[in-house]
Amino acid sequence: RKGDLAKALEYIQKSLKMFVTLGQKLAVAASLGNLGEIYWQQGEPKKALVFLKRSLKLAQEMGNGQYISNAIFYLILIAIENNDIDEANRYLKKLREFDKYEASKLINQKRKIAEALLLKKGKKIRNRLQAEELLKKVISEGIVNYQLNVIALLNLCELLLMELRATGGDKEIFNEVVELIDRLFEIAKNQNS
């Protein structure tokens, strides 16, 4: 997988240079966003931030809601990982605005996942239950984007495992976790990961 990401980085960097030369701003915004996503996946949030912020700025100039929402979504994930909840909430507010005005299932799922991850970060049980419900909604809507679905499945598994520990091994929760792991396995198999 790391080799695939390294190869992807190489190709995207080459295409980025070409798009800059050709003046294709929308393609530049997409490439910058893709680079940010890959750096995030590789565990390099500082590099990811640079590319995602550049992508966001350019996408805003072009008025492209999909690219704006994509950059904002990953900026939220990075802010959450960095425990910068205020920053994550600022970006979430922007993502909610896009979800409100754009009729896009993809943006809607990004918003639900971002909200769930922020709720999950909280210490209150009711926040975690709300996060669980949001993630279940995303998963029940079917796969709009494989990566989003995997993020939702993994985080729901984590929440259910916390619940499993707290209940002392409830069989129903255990079976739910097993079902989610099976889904993740199927996605990995279908994606040749």
Image (tube, rainbow, N blue to C red):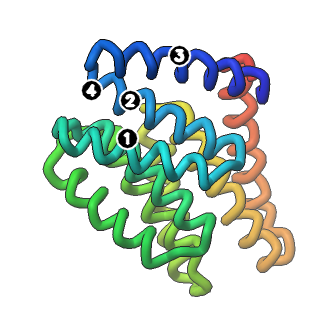
Q: Counting residues from the N terminus, which is met first, the one under dot 2 or under dot 4? A: 4
Farthest bottom residue in view: 124
Q: Nearer the viewer, residue 108 or 45?
A: 45
Locate residue 91: give its quadrant.
bottom left
Q: Counting residues from the N terminus, which is met first, the one under dot 4 or under dot 3? A: 3
Q: Nearer the viewer, residue 193 or 142?
A: 193
**Image quadrant occupied by the N terminus:** top right
* Residue displayed at 80% across by 62% down: 171
Residue type at numbered disc 4: Lys
55 horizontally vs 65: left or right: right
Whole-percent x, y for residue 113 in the image:
47, 55
Whole-percent x, y for residue 127 in the image:
51, 78
**Which secondary structure lies at badge 1?**
helix
Q: Is 112 rendered above or below residue 35?
A: below
Q: Nearer the viewer, residue 41 or 126?
A: 41
Residue type at numbered disc 1: Ser
60 horizontally vs 179: left or right: left
* Residue displayed at 19% across by 42% down: 61
State yes or no: discs 2 and 1 in contact (Cβ < 8 Å).
yes
Q: Is 79 rendered above or below residue 149?
A: below
Q: Which residue is mark 2?
A: 30
Q: Which mark is residue 55?
A: 1
Real-space Cα separation, disc 2 to disc 4, in angstroms? 9 Å
Q: Residues within 10 Å of mark 4 (few under 14, many from 20)?
A: some
Q: Residues within 10 Å of mark 2 (few under 14, many from 20)?
A: many
Farthest front residue in view: 21
Q: Which residue is mark 4?
A: 25
Residue type at numbered disc 3: Lys
Q: Which residue is mark 3?
A: 14
**Which secondary structure lies at badge 3?**
helix
* Residue displayed at 53% across by 16% down: 14
